[in-house]
Amino acid sequence: MGIKENIEEIRQSLQQELSSMSDIKQLEEARQKVLGKKGTLTALLRSMGSLSPEERPAAGQLINAGREMISAMLDARSAALKAVEREAKLRRDAIDVTEPRDLPRVGVPHPCTLALNEVLSALTGLGFDIVEGPEIELDHYNFELLNLPKNHPARDAQDTFYVDDNIVLRTHTSPVQARTMLSRKPPIRIACPGRVFRADEIDATHSPVFHQIEGLVIDKDVNMGDLKGTLDALFKKLYGEDMETRFRPSFFPFTEPSAEVDLTCISCRGKGCRMCKGTGWIEVLGCGMVNPKVLEMCGIDPTVYSGFAFGIGLERITMLRYGIKDLRLLYEGDERFLRQFR
């Protein structure tokens, strides 16, 4: 039998096999059977050694043509089988988009975040810029520039976390005010939100980590009336036009004079209830006129400029806003509690 006849016999035999094949594995086995090292077409190629030099070129051309034809047959069948497998996989993996499913559980804003956004929105509406600063702070900014020099007795009330003698975890966001006064010229109107740290116990009303929003205004002829007007406007925006504030004398080293601020009870609107212990008022923040010593240390002339500052405890505002009785609920990450604020 000649080479041409052998190639035709191999082609016909392969064509019969390909027609009955159902997967790629069988096809690759057939490819090796014909074109592999021990394949029938490869054996035919090796048999050319028995031909005369004159016969070899023509035989080589026939065998190469046969190889190309057989390779094309195998590739075509391979493409067809892969298409069938792909269609079968798509059918297996098909998703019925009409089938009812449970909705995925998604997160919700933390109540402190909700309260913070409300307060900052009210303050920016009153013309305040939002400024932030480092939580790990130098003693110089956290205490000294705020009229709390080394060994000052008022430092004892701060219960400070010290990294070393000169580095602390900030006990309030007032260092942001000091840094701003050093870097900006009046007029200054800023709100400073952020996390603060004090070595305090953990109970329903205390935590070693909490949040403050402090406000600072520095300009010419700023007075206590401006401070009260600002706080009245802030709380009316937050809780309604019937909210009023009441000032009580207090002491803070960085303000003089200083005051504690009471707000119309949010629960009873001033009528008297358990929340306000029948007084109609609840304490909400501390404030005062910026101490002239602080202005001077921060490079601002206290004979030209004056200012006021106030500090709001975010958790305090949040608990009042949503009627939360235990501070620890804000930090425990209990989804049953947090989902209520969806």
Image: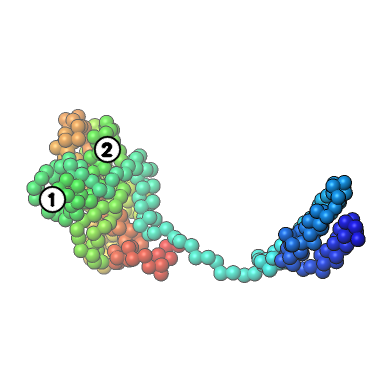
Q: Position of residue 257 (x, y in %)?
A: 15, 44
Q: Nearer the viewer, residue 11 or 293?
A: 11
Residue 281 quadrant: bottom left
Q: Hey, which quadrant is residue 278 in on the image?
A: bottom left
Name the residue nearer the viewer: 198 or 318. Answer: 198
Residue that carries the numbered disc 1 in the rendered image: 155
- Residue 281 in view (yes/no): no
Count all numbered tags in the image, as a single digit.
2
Disc 1 crowd, CA 10 A, few/some/many (<14, 14-19, 20+) = some
- Residue 314 is situated, as x and y percent measured from the top left of the image, at 30, 55
**Residue occupying the point 23% across, 43% down:** 175
Q: In the rendered view, would you say 270 is above or below 306?
A: below
Estimate the spatial distance between the alpha carbons at disc 1 and disc 2, rounded to whole Å.
Answer: 22 Å
Question: What residue is shown at x 72% (from left), y 59% (from top)?
Answer: 37
- Could you tell me which residue is drawn at 33 percent across and 63 percent down? 330
| Quarter in which the C terminus is drawn | bottom left
In the picture, measured across the screen, residue 150 lies left or right of residue 129, that is left
Callout 2: SS? helix
Give the colour scheme of this rendering.
Answer: rainbow
Taking the spot 39% from the left edge, 55% from the top edge, the residue there is 114
